[in-house]
Image: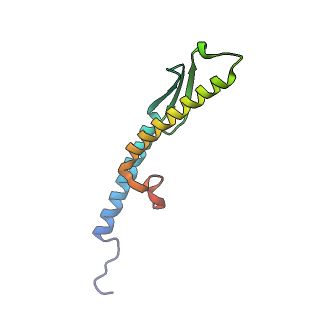
Amino acid sequence: MAGYKGGMGGGMQNLMKQAQKMQEEMQATEKLLDEWEIVGTAGGEAVVVYMNAKKKIDGIEIDKTVIDPDDEEMLEDLIMAAILDGYKKADEVYREKMSAFGGLAGGMGGLL
Protein backbone atom coordinates (compact mmCIF):
# COMPACT_ATOMS: atom_id res chain seq x y z
CA MET A 1 0.00 0.00 0.00
CA ALA A 2 2.23 2.73 -1.23
CA GLY A 3 1.39 6.13 0.15
CA TYR A 4 -0.68 4.86 3.12
CA LYS A 5 0.52 6.53 6.29
CA GLY A 6 -1.99 5.05 8.74
CA GLY A 7 -4.43 6.93 10.95
CA MET A 8 -7.79 8.25 9.98
CA GLY A 9 -8.23 10.42 6.96
CA GLY A 10 -9.37 14.02 7.41
CA GLY A 11 -12.88 13.14 6.19
CA MET A 12 -13.33 10.38 8.75
CA GLN A 13 -11.87 12.51 11.52
CA ASN A 14 -14.25 15.33 10.64
CA LEU A 15 -17.18 12.92 10.59
CA MET A 16 -16.26 11.63 14.06
CA LYS A 17 -16.04 15.21 15.38
CA GLN A 18 -19.47 15.97 13.96
CA ALA A 19 -20.87 12.80 15.52
CA GLN A 20 -19.35 13.72 18.89
CA LYS A 21 -20.81 17.23 18.67
CA MET A 22 -24.25 15.85 17.78
CA GLN A 23 -24.07 13.43 20.72
CA GLU A 24 -23.22 16.30 23.09
CA GLU A 25 -26.11 18.38 21.73
CA MET A 26 -28.47 15.44 22.09
CA GLN A 27 -27.37 14.89 25.71
CA ALA A 28 -28.00 18.58 26.45
CA THR A 29 -31.46 18.29 24.89
CA GLU A 30 -32.19 15.15 26.92
CA LYS A 31 -31.30 17.08 30.09
CA LEU A 32 -33.58 19.92 29.00
CA LEU A 33 -36.44 17.42 28.51
CA ASP A 34 -35.83 16.08 32.03
CA GLU A 35 -36.24 19.59 33.44
CA TRP A 36 -39.10 20.80 31.20
CA GLU A 37 -42.35 21.13 33.17
CA ILE A 38 -45.50 19.90 31.48
CA VAL A 39 -48.90 20.56 33.05
CA GLY A 40 -51.81 18.29 32.14
CA THR A 41 -55.29 19.29 33.23
CA ALA A 42 -58.83 17.97 33.28
CA GLY A 43 -62.20 19.19 34.52
CA GLY A 44 -61.32 22.86 34.14
CA GLU A 45 -58.14 22.32 36.18
CA ALA A 46 -59.96 20.35 38.87
CA VAL A 47 -57.18 17.82 38.38
CA VAL A 48 -53.67 18.99 37.49
CA VAL A 49 -50.78 16.63 36.73
CA TYR A 50 -47.17 17.81 36.63
CA MET A 51 -44.59 15.89 34.62
CA ASN A 52 -41.46 16.43 32.58
CA ALA A 53 -41.21 16.12 28.80
CA LYS A 54 -40.20 12.47 29.24
CA LYS A 55 -43.55 11.77 30.95
CA LYS A 56 -42.16 11.32 34.46
CA ILE A 57 -44.99 12.43 36.73
CA ASP A 58 -43.79 14.73 39.52
CA GLY A 59 -47.09 15.54 41.19
CA ILE A 60 -50.87 15.64 41.08
CA GLU A 61 -53.22 18.26 42.50
CA ILE A 62 -56.91 17.51 43.00
CA ASP A 63 -59.51 20.13 43.83
CA LYS A 64 -61.44 18.88 46.85
CA THR A 65 -64.74 19.81 45.21
CA VAL A 66 -64.38 16.92 42.75
CA ILE A 67 -63.80 14.32 45.45
CA ASP A 68 -67.09 12.49 45.83
CA PRO A 69 -66.84 9.26 47.85
CA ASP A 70 -69.93 7.99 46.04
CA ASP A 71 -68.43 8.56 42.58
CA GLU A 72 -64.86 7.27 42.53
CA GLU A 73 -65.07 6.57 38.82
CA MET A 74 -65.47 10.26 37.95
CA LEU A 75 -62.31 11.16 39.87
CA GLU A 76 -60.42 8.27 38.26
CA ASP A 77 -61.54 9.50 34.82
CA LEU A 78 -60.42 13.05 35.60
CA ILE A 79 -57.01 11.83 36.75
CA MET A 80 -56.57 9.73 33.60
CA ALA A 81 -57.71 12.63 31.40
CA ALA A 82 -55.18 14.98 33.04
CA ILE A 83 -52.40 12.42 32.60
CA LEU A 84 -53.29 11.90 28.94
CA ASP A 85 -53.40 15.68 28.42
CA GLY A 86 -49.91 15.90 29.91
CA TYR A 87 -48.67 13.01 27.78
CA LYS A 88 -49.97 14.70 24.63
CA LYS A 89 -48.18 17.95 25.53
CA ALA A 90 -45.00 16.05 26.47
CA ASP A 91 -45.05 14.22 23.12
CA GLU A 92 -45.28 17.55 21.29
CA VAL A 93 -42.33 19.03 23.20
CA TYR A 94 -40.28 15.84 22.80
CA ARG A 95 -40.91 15.70 19.05
CA GLU A 96 -40.08 19.39 18.64
CA LYS A 97 -36.84 19.25 20.61
CA MET A 98 -35.59 15.90 19.31
CA SER A 99 -36.52 16.46 15.64
CA ALA A 100 -33.13 18.07 15.07
CA PHE A 101 -31.58 14.63 15.57
CA GLY A 102 -33.85 12.81 13.13
CA GLY A 103 -34.06 9.08 13.75
CA LEU A 104 -30.81 9.13 15.68
CA ALA A 105 -32.32 9.90 19.09
CA GLY A 106 -31.47 7.18 21.54
CA GLY A 107 -27.74 6.80 21.13
CA MET A 108 -27.00 7.85 17.54
CA GLY A 109 -28.71 4.79 16.13
CA GLY A 110 -26.33 2.54 18.07
CA LEU A 111 -23.19 4.17 16.69
CA LEU A 112 -22.07 5.85 19.90
Relative to residue 68, is residue 17 drawn left or right?
left
Which residue is outermost to the top? Answer: 65
The quadrant the N terminus occupies is bottom left
Which x, y percent locates residue 40? 50, 29
Residue at screen point 64% across, 23% down: 74
Query: Which picture quadrant has residue 108?
Result: bottom left
Query: Which picture quadrant has residue 20?
Result: bottom left
Which x, y percent locates residue 46? 54, 19
Which x, y percent locates residue 71? 69, 20
Q: From the viewer's side, name the closer residue of 6 and 96.
A: 96
Please tell me whether residue 80 is drawn above or below residue 75 in the rendered image.
below
Residue at screen point 40% across, 47% down: 98
Please tell me whether residue 100 is drawn above or below residue 71 in the rendered image.
below
Q: From the viewer's side, name the closer residue of 5 and 81.
A: 81
The quadrant the C terminus occupies is bottom left
Q: How is the image coloured?
A: rainbow
Which residue is outermost to the bottom? Answer: 2
Q: How many marks?
A: 0
Which x, y percent locates residue 52? 49, 34
Please tell me whether residue 5 is drawn above or below residue 16 in the rendered image.
below
Residue at screen point 30% across, 87% down: 2
Residue at screen point 37% across, 58% down: 19
Which residue is outermost to the right? Answer: 70
Relative to residue 102, is residue 44 drawn left or right?
right
Q: From the viewer's side, name the closer residue of 5 and 61.
A: 61
Relative to residue 7, is residue 39 drawn left or right?
right
